[in-house]
Amino acid sequence: MSVQKRNFAIMWFSIFLVSATMTMIMPFLSLYISTMGDFTAAYVQKWSGLVFGATFVSAFLMSPIWGRIADKYGYKPILIINGFGIAISVLLMGFVNSVEAFFVLRLFMGIVTGFIPTSLAFISSQTAKNVAGKTMGTLQMGSVSGTLFGPIIGGLLADTFGFQYTFMITATAVSIAALIVLFGIHEVRKERKAGDHEYSRKTVISGIFHHRLILNVLMITSLIQIGLFSIQPLLSLYVSQLTDSKEVALLAGITFSATGVGSLLFARTWGKLGDSIGYEKILSFLLILAFVFIIPQAFVSELWQLVILRFLFGIAAGGLIPITTALIRRESPIEVQGELMGYNTSFRFLGNIIGPMFGGFISGYIGISSVFFVTGSLFLIAFTIIYFARKKPRIDFEDVLIEEEEMQAKLL
């Protein structure tokens, strides 16, 4: 087995393990907050959004920095730091007794979070552009598989053993993933040659703003994440409104996992289609499909109806991350690929920040059902952006970087 294939297999399993353990706590996040005091439903909903999005605030700032470090020193050290950092943060979350302390820990975790985005960037750096969609789709299957089993396991553990033990198990599993990367990964780094460019951060940022397609893809990435994350912290509360069962955490986990099943079945397929007929075309189609399947979720009266619609929504959602990642991979020169992936991750985290808070505040004032309508409109906006971007002539990003570098040199 080649080094690249071995790395891919290890990262697939590590992503599966981290995704499974990290999503264990998602179904009962709002329920855990409820145990910390006698709070109103509106208070819990708002803090659920804030706590859920807190991690992504610091992660938003750190991702480009980690990406730039990765271009210079390699991805493996960052993966190890992220893995053990997440484990320590999650372990401490099981011992908090106030919403504020929980919020601070989630904020702190963002500094060292990003194991999965860094993994995507690592594998992408070793992947040919013409098969980036299939590779990212296959890697996404590891993340989706973990997301599929994690909520069910987490809900079952929470109902059986309590929240604290679930946090402890989660921290242990993330530590195992970090150890696997530490001892199993062999990073093949590209040797720098005398003529290779080393673009400044200012050049890269300026290049992004002057490259229409990359800028549009980053904007779409944020809109997608807002759409995906606006309802997630509230889903357990929505489930509790649709059932009289006492096992709400488990049922919420099943509802979470329904989206994962749809994504798992189609993630690789969407990536392969993107490789063959164009990423922009597939992305446009998926955004419309996501809109079609998310709006009816606001009208469900039974839990089984929500589960089916979440499954159908997952079919569309499963291709969004692989396709946008493949687009960035296609456009980015190898010298700045880690940094550009870092900015892509930052825009994803920006969506992760806005989404939960956005959903939390909307549901607190108007109701949970209204979140589905607003989310649907975001997918339509993203479709409009990619529709007009496709009509513009394609420009090589490396040419833009060189032009920006020359312009900055003239100003000095």
Image (tube, helix red, strand yellow):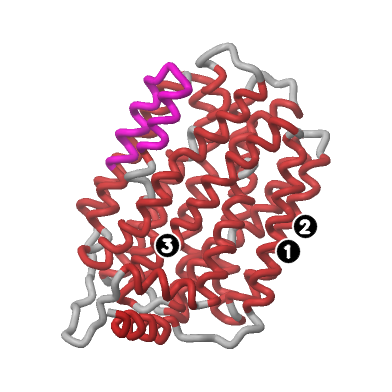
Q: Mark 3 touching mark 2, by CB under 8 A?
A: no
Earlier along the polypeptide chain: callout 3 or callout 2? 2
Magenta run includes residue 140: no
Part of the protein shown in magenta: 84-108
Classified by dominant secondary structure, the portion drawn in magenta counts as: helix
> Residue 339 vs residue 44: left or right?
left
Q: Label 1 crowding class (10 Å Cα cut-off): few <14, some 14-19, many 20+?
A: some
Residue identified by numbered label 1: 288
Earlier along the polypeptide chain: callout 1 or callout 3? 1
Residue identified by numbered label 3: 343
Magenta run includes residue 97: yes
Residue identified by numbered label 2: 292
Q: Label 2 crowding class (10 Å Cα cut-off): few <14, some 14-19, many 20+?
A: some
Query: Is any atom of residue 153 visible in this view?
Result: no
Is residue 93 positioned above or below 77 on the image? above
Residue found at the far left of this picture: 194
Q: Mark 1 touching mark 2, by CB under 8 A?
A: yes
Residue 34 percent coordinates (x, y): 56, 19
> Residue 184 vs residue 32: left or right?
left
Residue 363 percent coordinates (x, y): 70, 34
Instruction: Give the alpha-carbon distance from disc 1 to disc 3, as whole Å.
Output: 25 Å
**Amino acid at the residue labelled 1:** Ile
Which secondary structure, mark 1?
A: helix
Out of 225 and 265, give the one closest to the viewer: 225
Residue found at the far top of this picture: 38
Is residue 268 positioned above or below 58 on the image? below
What residue is at 39 percent from the left and 45 percent from the top? 58
**Amino acid at the residue labelled 3:** Tyr
> Residue 269 vs residue 14: left or right?
right
What residue is at 62 percent from the left and 57 percent from the top? 317
What residue is at 48 percent from the left and 51 percent from the top? 349
Number of numbered discs visible in the structure rendering: 3
